[in-house]
Amino acid sequence: MSLHAHHEPASPAPPGGQRPRTPWLVRLLMFAVLGVGAYYIIAEHGAHLLAAWPLLILLACPLMHIFMHGGHGGHNQTQQRSEGGSQ
């Protein structure tokens, strides 16, 4: 058995198998704050954003690579399947 074959759950599931929901007011306030912040950045710093746009696109590639590999099991997924490991 390899080290990657057995994973413990991060936290126990709440009764009923559902995650606790965030209240709608908290979500509404969060989106309002994000909207105001986005408007301020675009309105006041639009020229800076346009100048930095190519750099931001290039920076998005390694960030997506780092943060999105957890969703499909990382790089070892094909190796475990070829060895006969089940997931």
Image (tube, helix red, strand yellow):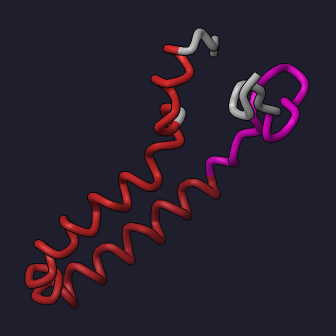
Name which quarter of the figure residue 61 lies in. Answer: bottom left
Magenta-highlighted residues: 9-24
Tell me which residue sits at (63%, 11%) in the image: 86
Quadrant position of residue 40: bottom left
User: Image height check: is 74 above or below 38?
Assistant: above
Q: Position of residue 62 (x, y in %)?
A: 33, 61
Give left or right: position of 82 versus 40: right
Establish if 77 lies above or below 23: above
* Residue at image location 84% in from the left, 30% down from the top: 13
**Relative vertical location of residue 52 with respect to residue 20 in this rendering, above or below:** below
Image x and y of residue 11, in percent: 84, 39
Q: Residue at x 69, y 48 (%)?
A: 23
Q: Nearer the viewer, residue 71 or 38?
A: 71
Q: Looking at the picture, how far across and down is residue 4, in whole percent?
A: 69, 32
Q: Quarter of the image for the C terminus: give it.
A: top right
**Which SS does the magenta portion mostly show?**
loop
Residue at image point 80% right, 22% down: 17
